[in-house]
Image: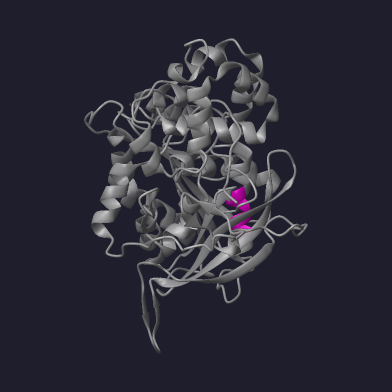
C-alpha cells in the first residue's frame, strides 16, 4: 500500500542536496537498498522502499500525550559497538509515542532516543535535548529516525540523507541524551506528514521530551533539564514548542531553545521558495496544510491544474533530494488553472489567509530563553521574516539571544544562502544549548535589536 496525498495549498523552507552532499562527504556509511517485498505483500512501500512494520501505528493509542506506544533497538548507521565497553556514540532506541494534532485528535509519532556513551559532567541528572529535524521531505522513507539507521539511501527512485546526524552526534559527545522526533505523519504510515504545521510540530517536539523519560534504560528523569534544537523546519517546530510549552507541557523543565532560520511567516516563506531550487517545499506545505485543514480542498480543486495536482501527488512520497532533482526553479503559476502564483491566490482567498494567520509564529510569548539565528542573505526562509520573529518576541519580554549570521550572497535561489548559516553557526548553537542544560544563566540582546542586521 503506497502513501498518497490529496491535492493541496501554500509554501515553505528547508535544507538540501548541498547539505546532503556535505553530509555524505563526512559520513563513511552508505546505504542500503530497500527491502524486497513479496508481490502479494501488504507492507507500506514508498518509492521502492519498504517501510518497517514498526512504523505502522496501532488502531488504538494511549490516552496520555507523550506515552510510549512501542520501542525497539535502533542500529546506528554510523557507530561502533565495543564488547564489554559500550556503543559509540551511544545506544539508540526507535520509539513511537502519542501526541495530539492540530485538530485535537490523537496521532502516533515516531523518532529515536539515543543514550550517549559519554558521561554527563555537569550538575544534576543527565539532560535531554530534543532535536527537531530540518526538512526531510514527505515520504515515509525520509524520516530522521530512518536516517540515523541508514545515513544515505539511494535506490534509483529516491535519495535520502540523514544530514541531521552530525549535529546529533556532536550533542551526544557532550554527554547529553538526544531525542529526535519524526513529526506527525513522517515515518508513520497512517497519514500524510503535516509539514510545517505550527501546532503539530510544537506538540510533536514537546511530547518527544515526555516520551524520552519512558524509554527503557534511559538515564533522563523528570528532573532532567530539557532543551530544544532545530533549524529551518526544525526551527519552526522548536519556536512553536517554545510558545506552547507553558500551557501544553508545563511539567517539562524546559531551559532553552535554539530556533534556527524559522519559517515564522509561511506566506513570506512561500514567496522566497517559489521559483527556487527548493520549490518542492511549496508542495509539501500545500499537502500538509490540506491534511490539517480540509476546507482547503475545494480551493485547491478549483485552482490547481493537472500539472499542479500531479506534482503534489508525486511530492507526497518525495524526499528533499528527490524534490530538488525533479522540481528545481519551477514557478507556482505553472501549477494553477489561471496562471496566477500561489501568493496571488492567497491574496484573493480569505480562508487561506486565515489559515496563514493561524500558522504564524510570534503571537505567543515563550517563557524560556531562546536563541534565534538567521542568515542575513537567506532567501529561501527569508531573513526578514525570521528576524521579525525575534523582534516580536522581544516586544513581549522574551529572553531572546538574536544572532545574525552575516555571510556574502552565495547564489540567489540556490539554497546555499539557507544551508551555509546552519553549518557556520552550528558550534555556537550547540555551545549555547549546552550552557542552558548545565544551568548557566543567559541574557538577552533585545536592546541591541535596532542596530542588528
Residue 205: in magenta span: yes
Magenta stretch: give its range. 204-210
Instruction: From the image, give the main secondary structure of the stretch colored magenta.
Output: helix
- Picture layout, residue 199 above or below residue 150: above
At 28% from the left and 43% from the top, the residue drawn is 18
Viewer-side residue, 13 vs 336: 336
Q: Is residue 181 visible?
A: yes
* Residue 381 coordinates in the image, percent (x, y): 41, 31
Asked where in the image residue 103 lies, by quadrant, the reply is: top right
At 55% from the left and 14% from the top, the residue drawn is 345
* Residue 157 coordinates in the image, percent (x, y): 39, 48
Question: In the image, is 415 to the left or to the right of 234?
Answer: left
- Picture layout, residue 287 above or below residue 92: above
Question: In the image, is 305 to the left or to the right of 104?
Answer: left
Residue 159: in magenta span: no
* Residue 372 coordinates in the image, percent (x, y): 43, 39
* Residue 271 coordinates in the image, percent (x, y): 43, 21
Viewer-side residue, 436 vs 147: 147
Q: Is residue 367 visible?
A: no
Residue extending farthest to the front is 39
Amino acid at each position: 500500500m503506497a502513501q498518497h496525498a490529496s491535492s493541496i495549498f501554500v509554501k515553505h523552507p528547508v535544507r538540501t542536496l548541498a547539505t546532503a552532499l556535505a553530509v555524505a562527504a563526512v559520513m563513511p556509511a552508505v546505504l542500503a537498498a530497500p527491502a524486497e517485498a513479496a508481490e502479494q505483500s501488504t507492507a507500506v512501500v514508498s518509492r521502492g522502499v519498504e517501510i518497517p512494520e514498526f512504523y505502522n501505528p496501532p488502531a488504538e493509542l494511549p490516552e496520555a500525550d507523550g506515552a510510549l506506544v512501542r520501542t525497539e533497538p535502533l542500529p546506528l548507521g554510523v557507530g561502533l559497538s565495543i564488547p564489554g565497553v559500550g556503543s559509540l556514540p551511544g545506544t539508540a532506541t526507535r520509539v513511537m509515542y502519542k501526541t495530539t494534532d492540530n485538530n485535537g485528535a490523537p496521532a502516533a509519532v515516531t523518532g529515536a532516543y539515543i543514550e550517549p556513551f559519554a558521561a554527563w559532567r555537569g550538575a544534576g541528572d543527565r539532560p535531554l535535548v530534543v532535536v527537531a529535524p530540518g526538512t526531510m521531505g514527505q515520504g515515509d522513507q525520509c524520516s530522521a529516525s530512518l536516517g540515523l539507521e541508514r545515513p544515505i539511501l539511494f535506490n534509483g527512485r529516491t535519495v535520502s540523507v540523514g544530514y541531521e546526524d552530525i549535529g546529533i552526534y556532536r550533542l551526544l559527545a557532550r554527554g547529553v541524551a538526544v531525542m529526535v522526533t519524526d513529526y506527525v505523519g513522517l515515518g508513520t504510515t497512517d497519514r500524510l506528514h503535516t509539514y510545517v504545521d505550527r501546532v503539530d510540530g510544537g506538540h510533536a517536539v514537546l511530547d518527544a521530551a515526555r516520551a524520552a523519560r519512558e524509554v527503557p534504560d534511559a538515564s533522563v528523569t523528570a528532573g532532567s533539564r530539557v532543551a530544544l534544537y532545530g533549524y529551518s523546519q526544525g526551527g519552526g517546530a522548536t519556536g512553536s514548542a517554545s510558545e506552547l510549552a507553558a500551557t501544553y507541557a508545563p511539567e517539562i523543565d524546559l531551559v532553552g531553545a535554539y530556533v534556527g532560520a524559522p519559517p515564522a511567516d509561511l506566506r513570506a516563506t512561500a514567496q522566497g521558495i517559489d521559483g527556487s531550487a527548493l520549490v518542492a517545499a511549496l508542495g509539501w506545505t500545500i499537502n500538509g496544510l490540506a491534511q490539517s485543514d480540509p476546507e482547503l480542498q475545494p480551493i485547491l480543486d478549483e485552482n490547481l491544474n493537472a500539472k499542479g495536482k500531479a506534482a503534489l501527488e508525486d511530492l507526497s512520497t518525495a524526499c528533499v533530494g528527490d524534490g530538488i532533482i525533479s522540481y528545481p526553479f519551477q514557478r507556482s503559476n505553472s501549477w494553477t488553472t489561471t496562471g496566477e502564483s500561489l501568493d496571488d491566490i492567497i491574496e484573493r482567498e480569505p480562508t487561506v489567509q486565515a489559515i496563514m494567520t493561524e500558522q504564524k509564529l510570534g503571537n505567543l510569548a515563550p517563557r524560556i530563553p531562546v536563541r534565534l539565528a538567521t542568515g542575513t542573505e537567506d532567501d529561501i526562509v527569508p531573513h526578514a521574516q525570521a528576524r521579525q520573529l525575534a523582534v516580536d518576541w522581544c516586544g513581549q519580554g522574551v529572553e531572546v539571544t538574536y544572532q545574525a549570521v552575516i555571510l556574502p550572497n552565495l547564489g540567489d535561489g540556490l539554497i546555499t544562502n539557507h544551508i551555509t548559516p546552519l553549518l557556520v553557526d552550528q558550534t555556537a548553537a550547540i555551545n549555547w544549548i549546552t550552557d542552558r542544560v548545565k544551568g548557566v544563566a543567559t541574557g538577552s540582546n533585545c536592546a541591541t535589536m535596532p542596530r542588528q542586521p
